[in-house]
Amino acid sequence: MDNIQSYKCPCCGAALEFSPSLGKLGCESCGNEFELDVLKQIKDAQDGVHESNYDWEHYEPREFGNQETKGISGYTCPSCGAEITGDDTLSATVCPYCSNATIIKSQFEGTLKPDFVIPFKKDKKMAMEEFEKACKKAPFLPDEFKDKKRISEMSGVYVPFWMFDCDCTADVTYNAQRIFRWSDSNYDYTRTDFFHIFRSGNVGYENIPVDGSKKADDNYMEALEPFDYTDAKNFDTAFLSGFLADRYDVSAEESIERANERVKNSTISAFGETVCGYINVVPVNCGVNFSRGKIRYSLLPVWMLNIKYLDKIYKFAINGQTGKVVGEYPVCKKKRNRFFYKVFGISLTIALVIGWLYLS
Amino acid sequence: MKKIVSRIMLFILCSCFIFPITSFANSTGSEFAVVDETDILLESELNELNNILLSLRKKYSQDISVVIANELYRETAMESADDIFDYGGYGYGENSDGMLLYICLYPREYYFSTHGSAMKVFNRNGLVYLEEKVVPYLIDDDYYGAIKTYADTSEELLEMAAGGTPYNNRPIKDILIVISLVILIPFVIAFSLTFRKLKKMKTANKQEYASNYIKQGSFNITRQGDVFLYSTTTRTLKSKSISGGSHTSSSGRTHGGRGGSF
C-alpha cells in the first residue's frame, strides 16, 4: 500500500487537511485553502532544490624551471613582512603595501609559476592621471591632499589571484508579492497576493577572481574588478620587468569559500532577474551544483599607492589594465559641513516660504 | 410636529427641481432652523434648538440651520448639504447668508455648508474649530448635544465676526506639524545628499556578485513556475475630515464648507 502523502501549509507550516465540501486542502491554523495541484507544484519545486555541491578540481601548483628564474630576485619588507618578486635590475623601491622604503633584496625562492598574467596597459604616468581624475570626483577631498609630491611613490604590482571557472545547474525558489490598491468613498483597500516561485536552469562562470594575497586588501582587489581576460597571456618572466610581483599566501583551497559565495549570490541574482512583475522577491532556497570546477593561478596588474596625510596612510589601488581607481579618501570636515549647511540653508529657506504661505 | 417637519422636508426636496433658486431670494430663511427627518430628537429638544438657532438668525442676520437625514440625497454629504441649502430656501437676506449642518445617519457623515458672508465668518479655520467641538458629540450619538454645541460655537464665531475679526486661528496641531516638517524635511534632504557624496569618498567596496563573469550564452532556464498561494486584503478608513473649500454647487452658487464621517 502506498504511503499517504501529507502536505504542510506553505504560509504557516501547519498540517493541511482535505475538505471534501470545498475539494481543497485547508489550514486550520491560518485559514488559507489550497488546490491540490498548487501544493504538488510547490512540493515538486522544493524537492528539486538539492543541497549545494561545489566540486572544484584540485589545483596542482607549477614550479618555475631553472632557466625561467634567471634575472629574478626576491624582496622582503622588514616592516610588513611582504615577500615580493621583481627583476634583478629593480632599483631601490618602496613596499607597495606599507610604503616602507627599505625593502631587502633576497634570493628568489618558493614562488610558484602562474598560469597566466594580464600585462600592465597603464604606465605610471597614465595611472597617475587616472588617480588625479578620480581625486577631482571626490567631493570632500582636502586641497592639500592633491599635492603631486605626495603621490610620487606609486608601485606597479602583479597581485596573485585565483581564478575559478564552473558550469552550474541551479534550483532557486523565491517568495514574492503583488500589491493592488484601490479605494471607495469610505475606505482605502490593499490586496497582497503571495506567490511561491521556482526557477531551475544552468549558468556558467569564467574567471571569477579571488585575491590570493593576504597583504592586498580583499575589498580593494574586488572593487578593482572587472579585468578584461581577452588580454591574458601565458606567464613569462619578461612581464615582470620594471614591476613587482607578489606571491600568493592564501591557498586555492582557502579561496574556494569566497568563490562559492560569489557563485551562489550571482546565481540567485541571475535567476531572480527572470522573476518579473513582483515586489519583495526574497530568495528562500538555492541549490547550486557543479563538478570539476577549474582553478587557475594568475597575476593581475595593480598600481599601489599609499599617501600619508595627517599621520594616517591612505591606500589606493589602480587597475593596471582599465585605470579604475579605488580607495578611501580623507574627508575634509570643513568642506563636508559647509556642503551640509549650504543644502540645509537653501532647503530651509524654501520650506519656510512654503510653510509661511500654507499657514497664512 | 415631527411629521409636519418631515413633510416640509419632503416638499423641499421635491421642489428642488421645480422651483428656480430665485424663488427663495430675499427670504429670511426657513421657519424651521432644525429639520429632523429621523425623529431622533425629542420634540422638546427640537423646539429648544429651533428657538436657539432662530434667535441667532435674528441677532446676527445669518441663517444657522441643521438638517438630520436618514440617507444622502445626493452622492456625497457635500452635494446633499449644498442642494438642500440652495433649493430649500435657506440663507438670510439678499445674499442668502448662512450655514447648514447636514447630518446623515446612513452613512454616518456630516457636512457644514456655508454661503454668502457666512463663508468669511465660518472660514476654513473656523470650521475646523467648529468641527472639533461638534463631532465628538456625533460620534457618541448625542445629537442634541451636537446641535446645542453647534449653536453655541456658531454664536461664539458670529460674535467674533461681529466685532470685526472673524476667528481665523490655525489649529495648534496644524502649526506644530508644519513647524516640524519645515525643520525636518531640509535636515533629511541635507543629510541624504551629504551621505551620498560621502559614499563617493570610499570606493573600495566588496563585490557580492560575479555577474560580470557569467559565460556568454550559458544562462538558460529549464524549469520555472509562479504558484499563487493566497491573498490578504486590508482596508483603512479614509481621513475623516473633508475640506470642501470654496466650490460650486449644482445650482451654480459658490459655497464653502467642511465635512467628514463620524
Image (cartoon, coloured by chain):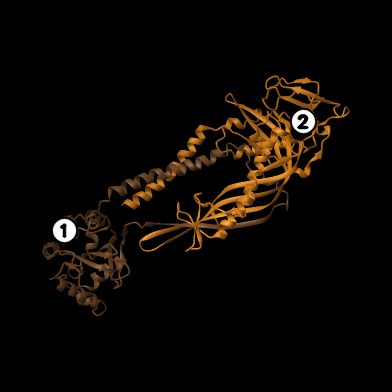
Chain colours: A orange, B brown
The answer to whether residue A321 is seen in the rendering is no
Q: Position of residue B184 (x, y in %)?
A: 40, 43
- Residue B148 is marked as 1
Q: Quadrant of the N terminus of chain B?
A: bottom left
Give B169 or B224, whichever is nearer the viewer. B224
- For the residue labelled by badge 1, is the local secondary structure a helix, a strand or a loop? helix
Q: Nearer the viewer, residue B168 or A175?
A: A175
Question: Split into 4 quadrants, where in the image is the C terminus of chain B?
Answer: bottom left
The amino acid type of the residue labelled 2 equals: Phe
Q: Residues within 10 Å of mark 1 (few under 14, many from 20)?
A: many
Residue count near mark 2 (Cα–Cα under 10 Å), binned few <14, some 14–19, many ≥20: some
Q: As drawn, is A122 to the left or to the right of A312?
A: right
| Element type at mark 2 | loop
Q: Nearer the viewer, residue B249 or A141?
A: B249
Question: Measuring 36% from the left and 44% from the top, which residue is drawn there?
Answer: B180
Residue identifier under label 2: A243
Q: Are marks 1 and 2 on the same chain?
A: no
| Chain on which label 1 sits | B
Q: How far apart, in angstroms, are the residues tagged by discs 1 and 2?
A: 94 Å
Image x and y of residue A89, in percent: 82, 25
* B95 on left or right of A17: left
- The numbered dot on residue A93 is none
Q: How many marks?
A: 2
Which residue is at the far bottom?
A: B18
Q: Is residue A87 above or below residue A115?
A: above
Residue depicted at 66% across the width and 53% down the height: A200
